[in-house]
Image (cartoon, helix red, strand yellow):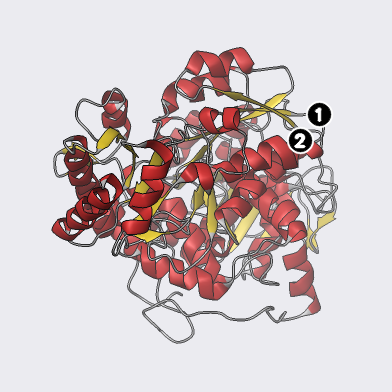
Amino acid sequence: MTDSVAELRRILRDSRTIAVVGLSPEWHRPSHFAAAYLQQHGYRVIPVNPRCKEILGERCYPDLLEVPESIDLVDVFRRTADVLPIAQQAVQIKARCLWQQIGVVNVEADRLAREAGMDSVMDRCVKIEHARIFGGLHWAGVNTRMISARRAA
Amino acid sequence: MADHVYQPETLAIHAGQIPDAATGARALPIYQTTSFVFDSAEHAASLFNLATFGNVYSRLSNPTVAALEERVAALEGGRAGLASASGMASEAMALMTLLQQGDHVVAAGALYGGSVSMLAVNLKKLGIDTTFVDASSPDAFAAAMRPNTRAVFAESLGNPSLQVLDIAAVADVAHAHGVPLIVDNTVPSPFLCNPIRFGADIVVHSATKYLAGHGTTLGGVMVESGKFPWDNGKFPGMTEPSAGYHGVRFYETFGDFGYTMRARMETLRVYGAALSPMSAWQILQGIESLHVRMERHCSNALAVAEHLRKHPLVGWVSYPGLIDDPQHEKLARQMRHVNGAPGASGLLAFGVKGGMAAGVKFIEAAQFMSHLANIGDTRTLIIHPASTTHRQLDDAQQRAAGVLPDMVRMSVGIEHIDDILWDIDQALAAAGA
C-alpha cells in the first residue's frame, strides 16, 4: 500500500479525473462531501452509482466499464467485500490509482492493483489526504504531520 | 519511503505552522480578525455545509488558533485538537460534547478544585451525576461504573494531590464499559507524559500552565486520540444526524476526528468559549521552549524536594520524583525521563511543622517566591490550598482532593536552584521563629 506524504502528493497532483464509485446523491453523506470537495479543488468527478442518473452536475454511470473517458483515480466508497470486482474493472480501464476509503481495506484488491502497476491506497479519505497535504485540514485542528520550512502551497 | 517521525522537541517548534502562504512569514502571523470573506455564495454554502475546510468566523476556527490546536495534538500524539479560552473551558467542551441529562461520570476524587466544582455542582445541575473515587485504585473506578456512565475523568498527575494515575489500568476499566477515558494532563505537560500512549481517549490541558509557561496567558486545549469507537451504540450523538448542525453525522463524515469536529461545531460554536488569536500566539511562543523549561522545572523540583525532606522545620514532603516515593515506579513507567530520572514536573507539596499557622507564616516570609493561585510559571509559586484554591470545598471534599490543612503547594520555577533553596530556608526560619 502507498502511504507516504511524497507518494500521496504525487498521486493527487498527477490525477485530474476521479471516478467516485458508490457516490451518494445525498449532500450529507461522506462520499458526497468528498466528491464536492474534489470538484471545488479542480478535479473532474465522474459519479459511478447504478441507482442515479446525475450527481453534482455530472452524468452518473452504472459501473467503471461504461465510463467513456479515461480515468486517473478510482475512489471506492463501498464495503470491503465488494471492492474486488471494482479493482478488476479499474485495471481493465487502465486507471492509475485504486483508492479505498476510510474503513475499506480489501487486501486482495490492493494486491491486484499493485500487480497491474497501479498505485494503491487503502483506509484513507481522498478529501482528508488532499486537505492534509495541500492545506485546509490544518484549520480544523487536525494533526496533519506536515512539517516544512517552505511556504504553504 | 516512510515519513520521518519527529521528536517532541522539534514538534514543539514546528508542528502546526508552516510559513504563511501569502507572505512567506516564518513566524506565525496573528490573524486578529473576527471573520473571513467568502469567495462566492457557493463557497459560503460549502463552508457552512462542512464540505470544504476553511474559516468562517473566529468563534469556530481561526488560523492562529489552529496552529496551537495542531501543535498540542502533535505533541500528545493525538489526531486533532480544539482550543478554548481556558483549561476549564476545554474541560467543559470535552464533557459537554459527550454528556446529556441522565448520564453519569466516574471521576477521580483528587482533582483540581475547579474540576470538582464543574462535575459536582454545574453538571449536576444539568442532571449529570458524578461518582468520585480514589484515583489510586483502578478497582474503585470499576466499582463505580453504571449502565448510564458515559465518561471517566482523571488527572495524569493530580493537582495538588500529586497522585499518579495508572492510566492504562483505568483506560481498561473505561473501555470495558465502552466509554472514553478523559485525562487532564496539565501538570506533566505533553513533554513529560502522553496519556494517549497508555490508552486515554481524550486529553485536556490548561495551556495557561506549563504550555504557555510564563504566567501571562489563559487558554485550554483538548485533544482526541482518534481511536475511540464512537459507533459502539453508547454515543448516538456521534453517529445519528446532528440536531445541532443540520443533520451531519460527525463520526461517519469525519471519522477519527469526528469528536473534535462535533465539539467545535456543536459545543464551542454555541457556548462561545473561543480562544483569542493573540492568546494562542502567546501560548505558542511558550510551547517553543516547553522541553527546555520542563527539564529545568523537573531538576529544580527534585532538588527542592530532597532539600525539604532533610529540613528540621518540615514535617513531610510529597513529590513522586523522590526515588523512595511509593508512586515512583508508576511515575517511571509513564513519564519521560529527564537526566536519568522520571520527570515529575515542578509541583510538590509539604507540611511546615506547626500546622496551618506556620504554613501561613512561611508563605508571608518568602522573598521572591510568589504567593498566588497558579502553577507552571517560570517563577517559583507557593500557596496554601486549604485556605485558597480549595476553600469552596468542605473538609471532607478537601481531603478527598488530597488537600491537608498544613499543606503548602509549591510550583518550582526555573530560577537558579541556589536562590530557590535560599528563599525556602530563610522563610522556614521565619516560620519556625
* Residue B35 shows in this picture: yes
Residue at horizontal 49 percent and vertical 53 percent from the top: A96
Residue B240, picture quadrant: top right
Q: Residue furthest bottom?
A: B23
Q: Chain of mark 2?
A: B
Residue toward you, B433 or B326: B433
Against A6, residue B47 (above or below) is: below
Residue toward you, B200 or A50: B200
Residue B143 rendering spot, x and y as whole percentages: 60, 12
- What's the CA distance linking mark 1 and mark 2? 10 Å
Q: Residues within 10 Å of mark 2 (few under 14, many from 20)?
A: some
Q: Chain of mark 1?
A: B
- Name the secondary structure under disc 1: loop
Q: Residues within 10 Å of mark 1 (few under 14, many from 20)?
A: few
Q: Looking at the image, is mark 1 or mark 2 earlier in the sequence?
A: 1
Residue B215, picture quadrant: bottom left
Of the numbered discs in the image, which one, if any, rests on residue B124? 2
**In front: label 1 or label 2:** 2
Of the numbered discs in the image, which one, if any, rests on residue B102? 1
Residue at horizontal 31 percent and vertical 25 percent from the top: B327
Residue B346 rendering spot, x and y as whole percentages: 31, 48
- Name the secondary structure under disc 2: helix
Residue toward you, B87 or A129: B87
* Residue B188 shows in this picture: no
Of the numbered discs in the image, which one, if any, rests on residue B330? none
Against B111, residue A18 (above or below) is: below
Q: Amino acid at mark 1?
A: Gly
Residue B251 rendering spot, x and y as whole percentages: 68, 41
Residue B196 rendering spot, x and y as whole percentages: 44, 37
In contact (CB < 8 Å): disc 1 and disc 2: no
Q: Amino acid at mark 2?
A: Lys
